[in-house]
Amino acid sequence: MDNVIMVYTKENPFKLEFFEKTFTTEVLIGKNGATINKQEGDGKTPIGEFETGIVFGLHERENVNLDESVQYVKINENLYWIDDVNSKYYNRLIDVTKVNVDWKSAERLIDYKVQYEFALEVKTNPQNIAGKGSAIFIHCSDGNQTAGCIALPREKMIELLSKIDKNTKVCIV
């Protein structure tokens, strides 16, 4: 279990541990707590064990200390994460220059320069089932609770990214 990011949502303060407690930090979670029944827009962090997806951020890959097995995307003004339950692109990262826009709601990633300077996708809804939650990430903190993500200090986020690989899991309890 040494390749699992553990997030504890029932403790106060909330905390994240990685690599058998060699990495520990306080985190912020969803403004409405945590749930085993995640729904789009509920403001809750989903509970469960999940795979990780892409890492994304504002920097060039060579300026991010990542294992070569981890997929990285540098964000720009064309990248959106779709949260419209009526879109065929629900819960996906989309480049608006490559598709026909069919959504009314999405996160334009570049608009979150503090939070998404560095971010790690948590695949809480890998089948992209409409309404079961979208855009759940571990990302840098701006000091506020999240809409369902897990936020930690920038320095700790950089350290965390340097330790993960494509097989890293996230367990939120």
Image (spheres, rainbow, N blue to C red):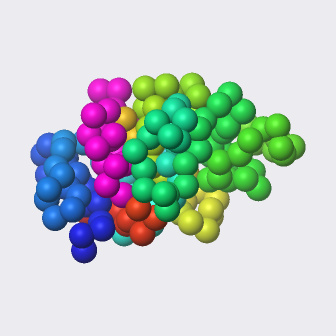
The residue at 78%/38% (across/down) is 96
Q: Nearer the viewer, residue 58 or 90?
A: 58
Vertical position of residue 129 compared to residue 16: above or below: below
Q: Is residue 34 left or right of residue 123?
A: left
The residue at 46%/32% (across/down) is 117
Confirm whether residue 173 shows in the render. Answer: yes
Q: Is residue 159 magenta?
A: yes
Vertical position of residue 3 compared to residue 27: above or below: below
Q: Quadrant of residue 21?
A: bottom left
The residue at 14%/43% (across/down) is 13
Confirm whether residue 138 shows in the render. Answer: no
Identity of the residue furthest to the bottom in this view: 1
Q: Nearer the viewer, residue 72 or 35?
A: 72
The residue at 83%/43% (across/down) is 98
Q: Quadrant of residue 29?
A: top left
Total labels: the figure holds 0
Q: Is residue 18 left or right of residue 139?
A: left
- Residue 32 picture location, percent across and down: 34, 43
Q: Quadrant of the C terminus?
A: bottom left
- Residue 91 picture location, percent across and down: 62, 53
Q: Which residues are magenta?
A: 141-164
